[in-house]
Amino acid sequence: MASEQELDAFLRSVEKRAFKRSLYHVRNQESALDIVQDSMMKLAQHYGHKPVEELPMLFQRILTNSTLDWFRRQKTQNALFTRLGDFESAEDGGEFDLLETLLQNDEVNHTSNPQNQAERAQTLRTIEDEIQELPARQREAFLMRYWEEMDVAETASAMGCSQGSVKTHCSRAVAALSKALRARGIFL
């Protein structure tokens, strides 16, 4: 059983990454924050009594379901409007750095040259843009596997699909990202 302190520590540890993941999906900061807060509340209310080891998988599943619920609500709301402009998001968010935490936590700055820093920042923005262009399921699988560092089984469980589907989504995402980045002259 997770104590209140353990649950609080867990939620603090996943807060920023969950927000970024949600932001990639919904592309709206306020909605992403709502999704993460709702997911955290659901975990605390319904699964706070579970062992600490089970919390990461439960939270990932709740976050995925909350995101899907948000899309369903948006689809329903959009079906009520007839003007094309009503389907466009008024708030596409401001600047958002995909690897912000990596940049902030980079204690050893290998890019002391301002030109190298600018090139690195541009490369990170390009990677972020290309990730946002991926289809939703590919983006979700890619972020869980490579951002959240979940294994195939955990990702499949969180996404509610087979392990083969996760592998397919990840493979397609990596291929699409690689092709898009090469087309922009970025070779990693």
Image (spheres, grey):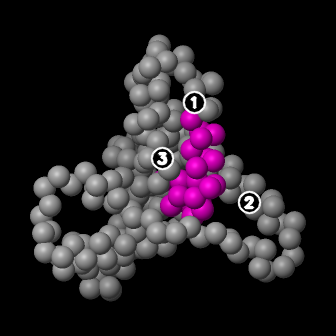
Quote the CA–CA distance across marks 2 and 3: 20 Å
Q: Nearer the viewer, residue 176 or 8?
A: 8
Q: Main secondary structure of the magenta part?
A: helix
Which residue position is annotated with label 3?
18
Give residue 45's position: percent from left, percent from top: 63, 24
Question: In the rendered structure, does residue 39 fall within the stretch colored magenta?
Answer: yes
Question: In the rendered structure, does residue 82 fall within the stretch colored magenta?
Answer: no
Give the magenta range: 21-40
Mark 3 residue element: helix
Which residue position is annotated with label 2?
74
Query: Which quadrant holds the C terminus?
Result: bottom left
Q: Amino acid at mark 3?
A: Ala
Disc 3 crowd rating (10 Å Cα; few below 14, some 14-19, many 20+) is many
Q: In this picture, is 129 found above or below 54?
A: below
Give residue 176's position: percent from left, percent from top: 39, 73
| 147 displayed left or right of 68 | left
Disc ID at residue 43: 1
Residue in view at x 47 percent, y 26 percent:
8
Q: In this picture, is 69 found above or below 95?
A: above
Quote the CA–CA distance across marks 1 and 3: 13 Å
Q: Amino acid at mark 2?
A: Gln
Please indicate, yes or no, whether residue 131 appears anywhere in the rendered image. Answer: no
Q: Amino acid at mark 1?
A: Leu
Mark 2 residue element: helix
Q: Nearer the viewer, residue 160 or 97?
A: 97
Q: Earlier in the sequence, mark 2 or mark 3?
A: 3
Disc ID at residue 2: none
| 151 displayed left or right of 64 | left
Q: Earlier in the sequence, mark 1 or mark 2?
A: 1
